[in-house]
Each structure stands twice: as C-alpha cells, then as structure tokens.
Amino acid sequence: MTSYISLRDRRFNVTSAVVRHFDGLWSVEIETMPKEFDGEIWSPRLYHQGLRLLASTEGDLEGASTSWSNKSDAAYPHPELGLMYVFGHHDVYDTTLAFGCATAGHVELTWNGLCDIFWSGDFIEAVPFQCRCVALVHHG
C-alpha cells in the first residue's frame, strides 16, 4: 500500500504513521513529507489523540472503524478531536477512519473526510482529504 495524504489533487507522501493504545484509548498520528505549493511549504499532519474503539490489541483493530459528521454532534463518541494541521489545527468532519489488515505490529489505515485549511481558492473550507497508510502499532 502506498502511504499518502491527499488534499483535493495535492498528494503528500507519509513519513510517519503511528497508532498507539494507552489508558483504554487509541491515538493516530500521521505526518507527511513537505512540498511547496503557491510559494508556501505544505506538510499536512492528520491526527486524533483520543479514539474510543472496541479494541485492545492490534488484531482487534482489524475491521474496526469509526465515523462522525461533526464534533458537536450529541453522538460524537470520542473524548478528543480528529484534526488536520496544514497552516493551523482544524477539525476533520464528515469523516470515516477504518482499519484493515493487522500483522506484525502494523495496521492498514484509511481515513477520508473534509477539513478546513483557510488558504485560498479550493483550499479554504470543506476540503476533501484522503489518507491511506500502514501504521506502526504501539502500546503504552
């Protein structure tokens, strides 16, 4: 699986992807290689630092998923927010995070949704993003 985050038609190679289990919660941290667009360096970072999932091991993650429309929804199940950082930290929304095959301390991950970047043109609000990667799994 090629590891990347795309924002509309701009694609960034993933340099680090880690899924961590601690105190009954999961976190996801995905960082990308910097690229220049519009005279600025872009290096998106996609992360969530408090996911409630019915999983306690990497094997339990296989096939697990979570989705939400907005953090303010009464049904939002997590104690923390999912965020995208490009030029500032902004919530991700209308989003689904799903885990695939888990083997040898790694798990496949897909995360799609919308985020706000507040740049210009097609990169202001409701910017579609897509992430595909294989993440290292840590406990503790």
Image (tube, rainbow, N blue to C red):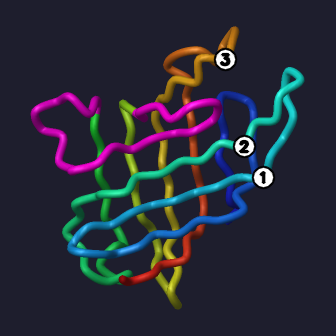
Name the residue tied to disc 3.
119
Name the residue tied to disc 1.
33
Q: Position of residue 61 (x, y in %)?
A: 34, 73
Q: Amino acid at mark 1?
A: Met
Q: Secondary structure at mark 2?
A: loop
Q: Is residue 126 above or below residue 113?
A: above
Q: Secondary structure at mark 1?
A: loop
Identify the magenta region. 69-92
Between disc 2 and disc 3, whose residue precedes?
2
Q: Where is residue 139, by image quadrant?
A: bottom left
Alpha-carbon span between mark 2 and mark 3: 13 Å
**Which of the pair 97/45 is nearer the observer?**
45
**Hey, which residue is sitting farthest front in the picture?**
88
Q: Residue at x 22, y 60 (%)?
A: 52
Q: Is residue 112 magenta?
A: no
CB under 8 Å between discs 1 and 2: yes
Q: Position of residue 121 (x, y in %)?
A: 69, 9
Name the residue tied to disc 2.
43
Q: Where is residue 81, by image quadrant?
A: top left
